[in-house]
Image (cartoon, rainbow, N blue to C red):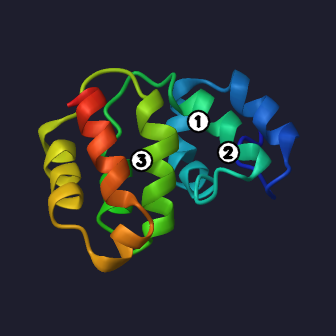
């Protein structure tokens, strides 16, 4: 079962992703999250829907993205995926969001990561 898209229009992989087990999705999660580097890609919405159904803490997968220097990816994770995740934010996630809100880098400000962090903290904090 191929659940990781091969290109940004690989809807067949998304169909397989929709019926994959949680353990299959978790095993492929690092590769799936790479397809959320631009939510304009057709596969991105499908991935968000399926990942948002996981009932596990995703900090180990998301914190490396949010502490990286890829501010575009941070923006898409904050604006697209994280609002769809169930439950409250962990202390580790809150700490990172507060840092991005209160002490954003110049690049994070340019990509509006600080604005998305603020919105997410207000909605889920």
- How far across and down, in percent of the image, does residue 3 sit? 72, 41
Q: Residues within 10 Å of mark 2 (few under 14, many from 20)?
A: many
On the rendered structure, is 69 left or right of 5?
left
Query: Element type at marker 3?
Result: helix
Q: Residues within 10 Å of mark 1 (few under 14, many from 20)?
A: many
Closest to the camera, between mark 3 and mark 1, is 3
Q: Residue sitting at 44 percent across and 71 percent down?
A: 70
Q: Which of disc 3 and disc 2 is earlier in sequence?
A: 2
Residue carrying label 3: 78
Compared with residue 53, is residue 12 higher up or lower down, i.e. above or below? below
Q: Which of 26 and 102 is in front in this view?
A: 102
Q: Report how far apart the C-alphas of labels 1 and 2 lie in the structure.
A: 6 Å
- How far across and down, in percent of the image, does residue 16 sit? 78, 31
From this viewpoint, is residue 10 visible?
A: yes
Residue carrying label 1: 48
Q: Nearer the viewer, residue 90 or 120?
A: 120
Q: Residue sitting at 52 percent across and 46 percent down?
A: 29
Q: Report how far apart the C-alphas of labels 2 and 3 lie in the structure.
A: 14 Å
Q: Which of 95 and 63 is in front in this view?
A: 95
User: Residue reaching furthest bottom?
Assistant: 106
- How far across and down, in percent of the image, does residue 94 sit? 17, 43
Res. 44 mark: 2
On the rendered structure, is 63 left or right of 53?
left
């Amino acid at each position: 079962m191929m659940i990781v898209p091969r290109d940004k229009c690989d809807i067949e992989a998304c169909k397989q992703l929709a019926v994959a087990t949680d353990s299959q999705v978790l095993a492929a999660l690092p590769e799936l999250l790479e397809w959320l580097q631009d939510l304009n890609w057709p596969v991105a919405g499908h991935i968000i829907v399926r990942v948002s159904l996981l009932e596990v803490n995703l900090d180990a997968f998301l914190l490396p993205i949010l502490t990286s220097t890829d501010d575009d990816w941070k923006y898409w994770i904050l604006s697209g995926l994280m609002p769809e995740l169930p439950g409250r934010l962990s202390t580790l996630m809150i700490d990172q969001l507060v840092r991005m809100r209160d002490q954003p880098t110049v690049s994070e400000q340019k990509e509006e990561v600080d604005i998305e962090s603020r919105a997410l903290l207000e909605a889920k904090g």
